[in-house]
Amino acid sequence: MPDDASRPSIRDVRAELQVSKWLSPIHVLLTFRAPTIAAHAQPGQFVHLRVSAFGNSPLLRRPFSIAGANLADGTIRLLVRTVGRGTFMLGELFPGGELPALGPLGRPFPEIEKGREVVLVAGGVGVAPLLFYAATRDHDTKVALYGAEAELALVLADELAEHCDRTQLATDDGSVGHHGFVTDLLPETLGGLRDPVVLACGPRPMMAKTAAECRTRGVPCYVSFEAWLGCGVGACLGCVIPAAGEPRAYVRVCRDGPVFDADEVGWDLLR
């Protein structure tokens, strides 16, 4: 795990909304101008965004994985699922509005050797950091497995497919692709590759099953956790998850992650 000295410095900036694009009735893709964050962002990192431009309500910022960064125009993209007051406020923000944004935060995905096949396993809005990875990392083979509850929730499937050699979809209701969990696609996918590495982000049960399948096959696996954060910088300990190894050991999603080697996580104790 890298020490703090190896991390780029964190910026707290005023991020200006450039584009608000609704991808479904509850999913919105926001493009913010934040040049200093865009210049240092790496796939797997996140920003901690205050959702109100004025006042302190809601008090706590909201964490969002960076779905893309453009150095040319200094923008970052955030995928938001509007499920509560704070995210609804983001969906109502007009272009030109500015919000305080702290980032880039957290540990990114590791550099993967060029000759290895990369398998991206995405669940729901967990596609965001994996899309950033797919768009910016060059590999001979990139395979994407993307699942959600229904076709309407596979909001970035077309864009993800543009950056991957092969993409397979799964939906809980069978509206498109495989009828079932995205992890059902993993055994056959891994069995057809020579030297794969798996990167996953999505619901915790999905990542736990992905990690277990990779462990059985001896395949390296890295998982990116989504969690509600208080401070975002490791001080409040509100985002801890069980660590593998000795009992009662924990790691912080915001500071030690959000990306972890799957072997670092105490999956049996995770809730």
Image: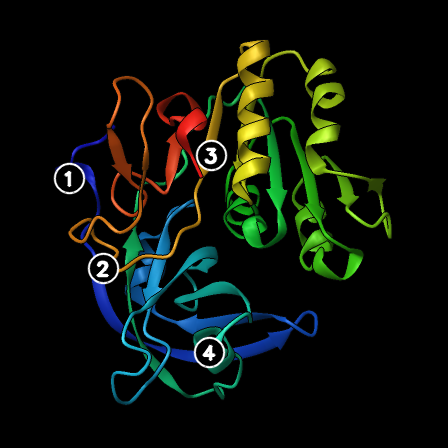
Name the residue at 31% across, 69% down: 61
Q: Nearer the viewer, residue 254 or 238?
A: 238
- Between disc 2 and disc 4, the foreground one is 4
Looking at the image, residue 176 sits to the left or right of residue 30; the answer is right
Disc 3 target residue = 223
Q: CA distance from mark 3 to mark 1?
A: 20 Å
Quarter of the picture containing the C terminus is top left
Type of amino acid at the residue the image marks with label 3: Val
3D distance between C-alphas at marks 1 and 2: 17 Å
Disc 2/disc 4 C-alpha distance (Å): 19 Å
On the image, numbered disc 4 is attached to which residue?
A: 85
Pointer 2 residue: 231
Q: Which label's residue is closer to the chain start, 1 or 4? A: 1
Question: Is residue 148 in view?
Answer: yes
Q: Specify the amino acid type for callout 2.
A: Cys
Judge left or right: residue 260 versus residue 126: left
Q: Which residue is mark 1?
A: 4
